[in-house]
């Protein structure tokens, strides 16, 4: 009696390029409305490969379609998710013990954290213990194909092409991934991108200034600088003593020397203290004019953008009210 062929469903989020490269012209396009589907026929099975797009909702819809439309007995979820880590390697098997529904959000209704169902104590939903135990037992028993056996049964193994700046093994790299020249993959966020731009383009802004005078005779003298000051520019008073009146710039944590009849050592300590020291006790007080500068952070710039947007909105409302008042008069 001829053994019935199995029907397998393969769900692919975005890595369809690797599948197409692997099976090539062996695939038949059987796409349905709303779903991109390819069919692969072999002596032992028929596999339907569905490109679902990213996200658990898309994955759930695609999975249900494979089961309902084609009667899939097994579902294979193919992709690189979780595999781009140092802990993973080829042919390594992982057993899932818990899952997170990261798209599930009822927080506006019940104040429950995103991803958590009220009946569970945390966002992590445990997999059925009997399934986890069965999976672990299967792995430990060795009842699965070795790489050589799989290559012999399913054909020549697919080898990922070298990663480039635009392609990761046949998979297009999105806006939030970087590939170095040596092929190293790293993740980035929109804030990382903006912050890098801010670090290069932002200029220090004057946020504080003061005029201070030391005691008449001193060897050390401290001046407290505000926390938001990242760099200071100091100028010696012209009437208190002779010496160099050149402006000196010191970044927080830096040190400079200043010639004011005496060679003062001036340190802008990381705790915000401006520490002035001299080897000999001075005969005259020292006057300093100090300007404090701040390098805008990403948070500062985003706050300013939000404030500008709010001001523009207020202005638009005011203009509309003036226009309506003019029309009424």
Image: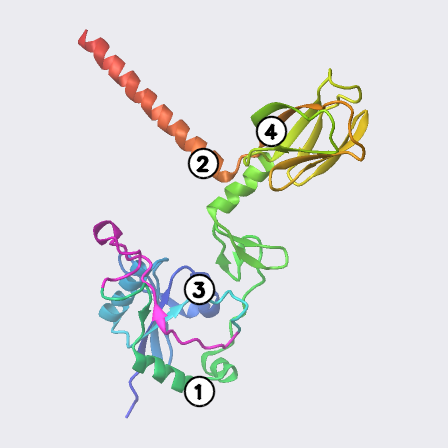
Judged from the image, the secondary structure of the residue bearing numbered disc 2 is helix
Q: Which residue occupies 23% across, 68% down?
A: 69
Eyeballing the image, is 251 above or below 99?
above
Q: Are marks 2 and 3 in contact (CB under 8 Å)?
A: no
Residue 303 numbered mark, or none: none
Q: Which residues are magenta?
A: 90-118
Q: Which mark is residue 81?
A: 3
- Dot placed on the residue nearer the N-terminal end, 4 or 1: 1
Along the horizontal axis of the image, is 29 left or right of 155? left
Which is more foreground, mark 1 or mark 3?
A: 1
Earlier sequence position, callout 2 versus callout 4: 4
Question: Tag count in the figure?
Answer: 4
For mark 1, does the 10 Å Cα neighbourhood hold few (<14), some (14 to 19), or many (20 or more) residues?
Answer: few
Residue 13, position as x, y percentages in the image: 38, 61
Residue 140 numbered tag? 1
- Please report the residue visible at 72 percent of the width from the left and 28 percent of the height from the top: 248
Q: Secondary structure at mark 3?
A: loop
Q: Are marks 3 and 4 in contact (CB under 8 Å)?
A: no
The image shows residue 174, relative to residue 255, as above or below, that is below
Residue depth check, mark 2 versus mark 3: number of the one nearer the observer: 2
Quadrant in the rendering for residue 6: bottom left
Gap in angstroms between the C-alphas marked 1 and 2: 53 Å
Q: Main secondary structure of the magenta part?
A: loop
Sequence-wise first label, 2 or 3: 3
- Marks 4, 1: nearer the viewer: 4
């Amino acid at each position: 009696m001829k053994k019935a062929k199995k029907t397998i469903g393969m769900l692919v989020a975005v890595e369809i390029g690797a599948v197409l490269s692997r099976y090539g012209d062996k695939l038949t396009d059987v796409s349905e409305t709303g779903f991109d589907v390819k069919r692969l026929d072999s002596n032992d099975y028929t596999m339907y490969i569905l490109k679902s797009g990213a996200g658990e909702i898309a994955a759930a819809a695609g999975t249900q379609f494979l089961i309902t439309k084609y009667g899939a007995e097994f579902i294979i979820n193919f992709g690189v998710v979780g595999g781009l880590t140092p802990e993973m390697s080829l042919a390594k098997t992982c057993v899932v013990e818990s899952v997170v529904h990261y798209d599930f959000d009822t927080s506006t209704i019940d104040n429950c954290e995103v991803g958590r169902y009220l009946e569970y104590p945390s966002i992590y939903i445990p997999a059925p213990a009997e399934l986890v135990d069965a999976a672990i037992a299967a792995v430990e028993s060795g009842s699965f194909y070795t790489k050589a056996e799989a290559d012999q049964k399913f054909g020549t193994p697919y080898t990922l092409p070298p990663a480039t700046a635009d392609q990761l093994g046949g998979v297009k790299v999105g806006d939030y991934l970087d590939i170095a020249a040596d092929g190293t993959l790293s993740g980035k966020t929109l804030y990382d991108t903006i912050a890098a731009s801010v670090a290069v383009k932002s200029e220090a802004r004057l946020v504080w200034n003061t005029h201070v005078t030391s005691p008449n005779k001193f060897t050390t003298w401290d001046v407290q600088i505000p926390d938001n000051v990242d760099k200071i520019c100091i100028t010696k008073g012209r009437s208190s003593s002779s010496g160099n009146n050149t402006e000196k710039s010191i970044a927080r944590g830096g040190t400079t020397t200043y010639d004011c009849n005496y060679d003062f050592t001036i340190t802008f300590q990381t705790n915000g203290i401006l520490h002035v020291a001299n080897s000999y006790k001075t005969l005259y007080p020292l006057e300093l004019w100090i300007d404090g500068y701040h390098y805008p952070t990403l948070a500062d710039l985003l706050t300013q953008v939000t404030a500008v947007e709010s001001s523009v909105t207020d202005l638009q409302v005011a203009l509309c009210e003036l226009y309506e008042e003019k029309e009424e008069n």
